[in-house]
Image (cartoon, rainbow, N blue to C red):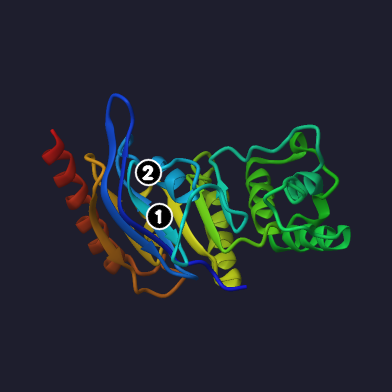
Amino acid sequence: MTGAHIVASDVALRYATRSVLHGVDLSVAPGELVALLGPSGCGKSSLLRTVAGLTKPTGGSVRIDGNVVEGPRPDVVFAFQDPCLLPWLTVEHNVAFGLTFRRQPQLSRADRKRRVKDALAAVGLSHARTWLPSQLSGGMAQRAALARCLAREPRALLLDEPFGALDEVTRAGMQQLLLETVRRTGAAALFVTHDIDEALIVADRIALLGNRGTLAGQWAIDLPHPRTTQIQSLGELRISILQALHNSITEAA
């Protein structure tokens, strides 16, 4: 299965009392990981929900492989900051949750078991398949949430600050796991984060959403992994992004 090609064209979003997004153009290619940065309240999560088909844009469109997104799709998964594990289900049952939903492809019991087994192995949780969420650390819970996404064999991954509450060491491990997941599956990945350094470490491209809900800049990151040794190159990119962020805030004031 190849990854999806996501194209947001001139996307606008307005609520009753305020405008959130204005003319946003953004694409994500199969196998590409794009980090979406921006100040709090600029519309990052709103854009992600629009791409996922959870929120309908008031202007423009989102297309996946040329087809307009009219609602949630079984080949597009959304990962929240909270792992959202059901406390009464074991890890393996949490990972399997949703595979029998109406919008999902019909799978045999054997195929569902295979998907869950493979997803748990991919995130290193095979040993914890019978555990309850209360027995998991924060990092393990996030890995279980990612396994639940992988079990659906998605063509697109949409992630809304999934590592924001983790400690530095655990977060680094999850970042590496995300990279490996995108490379292995070829999925298109759009990743919301507040952390410029995190974006620089994991992303193939960074898109900055400004205070007015418009794209304030994009940066391709053509550096090999791991990038922790690329201090000078990353530093120059960081300064450029911070300057664009400052400009967008100043213009909106």
| Element under disc 1 | strand
**Most foreground residue, 180 or 64:** 64
Residue under label 1, please give it: 62
Label number found at residue 57:
2
Give the vertical position of 60 relative to 80 (above or below). Answer: below
Relative to 247, is 227 on the left or the right?
right
**Cα distance in 3D space between marks 1 and 2:** 8 Å
Task: Residue 21: give x, y in percent of width and height.
Answer: 29, 42
Identify which residue is drawn at 37% across, 73% down.
223
Relative to 127, is 5 on the left or the right?
left
**Most foreground residue, 243 or 65:** 65
User: What amino acid type is highlighted by mark number 2?
Assistant: Pro
Q: Dot 1, crowdedness within 10 Å: few (<14), some or many (≥20)?
A: many
**Rendered image quadrant of residue 32:** bottom left
Identify which residue is drawn at 42% across, 48% down.
192
**Most foreground residue, 208 or 71:** 71
Label number found at residue 29:
none
